[in-house]
Image (cartoon, helix red, strand yellow):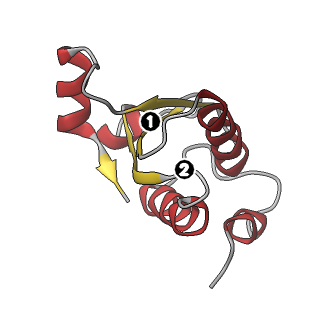
Amino acid sequence: METVSNLFKTQPSALPQIIPTETLKLLLKTFKEQKGEHFHLTALGYFGSYARGEARPDSDVDIVFQTDYPNLLATVALQLELTELLNRPVDILRYRPSLSPRLKTRIDQEAVYV
């Protein structure tokens, strides 16, 4: 099985301007399989423009995750690793009951989990 870093390195310099949906799913799925335990991930997915099929070359990737062990430093590390892996800005959000109802509804409708 390829490691997450090897998947990215097979495409030197950068991913295409817009990450193809199947590539994004594969990268996140592999990341979760290999590093999910380290980050205590119970769920990992994306939402926003990539989930709606509206991503542009300048779009960031909106990531949603759930964890058994919420920790600010781990969240920052997760964001940094995903930013490096995807080679573009990543916004990250921990899904939790205290999210605003509007945001929670949006994520529930849009999120694609791997």
Q: Give the amino acid type for the residue marked by disc 2 in the picture.
A: Ile
| Element type where label 2 sits in the image | loop
Which dot marks residue 87? none
1 or 2: tag closer to the N-terminus:
2
Residue positioned 44% across, 35% down in the render:
55
Q: Give the amino acid type for the residue marked by disc 1 in the picture.
A: Ala
Residue positioned 70% across, 37% down in the render:
80
Q: How many C-alpha atoms fall within 10 Å of the one at disc 1: few (<14), some, or many (≥20)?
A: some
- Kindly indicate the quadrant of the structure image that contains residue 50: top left
Which dot marks residue 19? 2
- Foreground residue among 41 and 13: 41
Q: Position of residue 75 (x, y in %)?
A: 59, 34
Q: Position of residue 33 (x, y in %)?
A: 52, 69
Residue, disc 1 = 55
Question: Which image quarter is the N terminus in?
Answer: bottom right
- Foreground residue among 48 and 34: 34
Q: Does residue 73 appear to the left or right of 114 in the view shown?
A: right
